[in-house]
Image: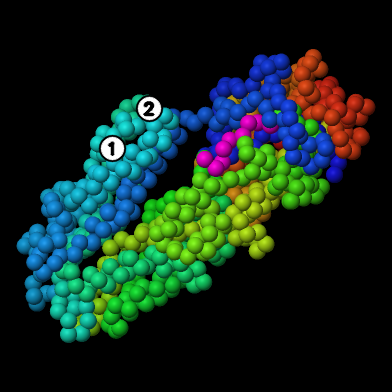
Amino acid sequence: MKKLLSFLGIIGLVATSTLTVVACGNERDYTKDNEGEETGEGPGEGEGSGEGTGEGGESGNGNENTESAIEKVAKYKDLLDKVWIDTFEDELSQSKIMTKIEKDLSGDLEGTKIFNFGYLTKNYPIPTEQGSIKIDFSHNDQAKQKMKNDLQIIFHDETFSGYFTEMIKKNYDKYRDIAIGMAWKDTYGGFEIGNEFNLVGQYITPKPNATKELIYTLSLSPILKMYYRDESGNKDIYKTTPFEINLLIGENGNVMQMVDAVKDKLPSQLLNNNQEPGATQFEYNDFKNSTKYVKNYGNVKKPIVNFVNDSKQSIFKNNLVKTIDEILKAQVETGVNVEIDPGDLINQKNVSVSGDWLKTEEDWSQTKSLTHFQNNSLVNNLILKNKNDPGMNEETAIRLIESRLFTSRVIKSETYDEKLNKFLNKYIQDKKVKKQIVHEVHAHGNFKLSNLQIVFNTQNNNVKLKIPTIIVPWTYKNNESSQLKSKKEEFLSALYQSILFANQHLWNVNKNPVVFQTMFNMDWQAKTDYQKALQKATNTSWEDITNKLNNGGKIAINQGMHFQVGTGASGNSEMNGSAIGDLMTTSTAMKFESFTSSIKVGTDRDLVVKKGSNGKFGVGLNGGDNFQWAKLDYNLSFGDIQIKARFPWFNPNYNGPETTGEIIEELNDGFYGRWPLDKDWGYFRDATHKPDWLLFELN
């Protein structure tokens, strides 16, 4: 294919654990002149003999990747959340949320004050004629104080300390200004009890002619408090989002055995039974009917919640009820079944992500920006190609993306796979099945079920017993393609298709002769959002901008004016409802929920918004020979994957390597006119002296 953009000689692709925030200040990661430019040489895999890698000196950790203090604090809070979730899910903690009392009344956890069978039977006895009691503790400060004490026993300091120490050792250098030391005792701030706090006590006859058993259930929503330093360095308290938990304490008999069986067997059975609709080995194709505009890659919590709660098809709920009823039937043949509380089963607060391959920094090592490699096909034939050209085929594209995106030139997943394998060991014993899951899955975690009840029909008048909070494991894989069988293949294919879609609507090079008037074409959605971005950056209405440009004025493009557009899922709420945001959100061709496009200008006043003689407004050069100093990056972010194409405006006085290098394959001769094909400066020098030349149009 003809190379129409060989002058775009630099492309850097960087995988990071979070989205880049494009800085709005005067940060500068460019050199003052071309003598200080990045250099690098070296052949690499390519599309042909003209393809090279030329890894350069820029590390990919430039100013645009620098996290703000607010972002770092938010990420540290996420780590604190994980310490709490890990402690809650710990086997020792889970073993304490259901306490069995023996006939000699032994079994109470030492030191407990309200989650204590002796205390409850003495202070909240159940009248024989009544059969059950329900007490609202939500306004009982004394009961809450006792419960805080008991939560510290159930979720012990040693368990907390183990998970906190593991976390802080890995992250202390990054968060030393936010963490309150390296000891859990300095971070721990105690528990609070949320608005819901109830006690239910009841006698239950588990089966015909059996003895009644006394069971108490405490339902509450605890909040864990932890100390940290805010973005100003002041000590503050972080409070976790509350979620409901059920604590069960009662006589060790058939009832507790039934609850035990459900609690122990349900998680594994839901994950293992992948042949059953509603199993928790979630797939992209599972989510399409329950989540509108669901993406292959994005916030997986929302589609999980929608799928689990779906009441139209009830795929998960039906499987859940069927599975629990089968477990109960193995304990007692008749008279017992499960019931789900009205309303939703879970919300996003109940879902946690234990691992995400696309966010595993050990596997996604950052590469240096790639500079000075010859004949940049990824830019020319894919990212910025003419929208009507077919462009690079998928097989070639994904090979080049992989070889240039990672330091090792190969996408790795060893760290994530090891973590996933460890997660699966608890639930799946079949090594062949486990190996296949690891090969395909790119995210995993669990969700908490707190609204299940066992209904005892026989001799009980349908007495209902809340099942203690159950931790259900899940995995997720993108399985949109029936041909692709690994997470790497699915991911690279999705990235390729998303780049093609962005190319159709954002920057795509014009063909000769239009390219000599305006270099890039954009659809109306991009122009609409670019206009809004310009208004915001200049704090000027479009009407006033129009008047200024119509009167011969210009608006300087400075370093802070970055024309960022995309979806609200990228973290910028202002993009919700934007033209590009709606387009990217509603199209199945875009595979990533979070998407942004922006430009980064490294110099002031070399580029301006102006009006051409054809009446079009757009961004162009400010005149003179300033093009050789103008610094401009075109950035795309697909989820956590960032792509940067840098314009190497050629400096004829620079004696270093050519920014583009020799052009090997045939070009459209008219593109460069009379200038040599191994030079790109001629095009820009000519454009400089054309007052109507535009990089792109805004209307």
Secondary structure at numbered mark 1: helix
Which residue corresponds to the image point at 22% horizontal and 81% vertical from the top-left?
207
Residue 172 part of the magenta segment: no
Query: Callout 1 environment at 10 Å: few (<14), some (14 to 19), or many (20+)?
Result: many
- The image shows residue 560, relative to residue 452, as above or below, that is above
Which residue corresponds to the image point at 28% horizontal and 46% vertical from the top-left?
159
Picture coordinates of residue 309 (x, y %)? 43, 64
Say whether residue 62 is left or right of residue 189: right
- The image shows residue 372, relative to residue 204, as above or below, that is above
Picture coordinates of residue 137 (x, y %)? 17, 56
Q: Is residue 384 visible?
A: no
Query: Callout 2 environment at 10 Å: few (<14), some (14 to 19), or many (20+)?
Result: some
Tag on residue 177? 2
Say whether residue 314 is left or right of residue 389: left
Which residue corresponds to the image point at 20% horizontal and 85% vertical from the top-left?
208
Q: What sort of colour scheme is used for the picture?
A: rainbow
Q: Which residue is mark 1?
A: 184
Query: Which quarter of the image is occupied by the N terminus?
Result: top right
Q: Would you identify the image quadrant in which residue 557 lies?
A: top right
Tag on residue 664? none
Q: Is residue 413 visible?
A: yes
Tell me which numbered mark, 2 or 1, is placed earlier along the sequence: 2
Secondary structure at numbered mark 2: loop
Task: Point out the stretch of residues depicted in magenta.
Answer: 362-370
Question: Which residue is at the front of the view, 300 or 52?
Answer: 52
Picture coordinates of residue 155 (x, y %)? 25, 49
Mark 2–mark 1 Cα distance, whole angstroms, equals 16 Å
Which residue type does callout 2 highlight? Answer: Asp
Which residue type does callout 1 highlight? Answer: Trp
Question: Which residue is at the front of the view, 20 or 269?
Answer: 269
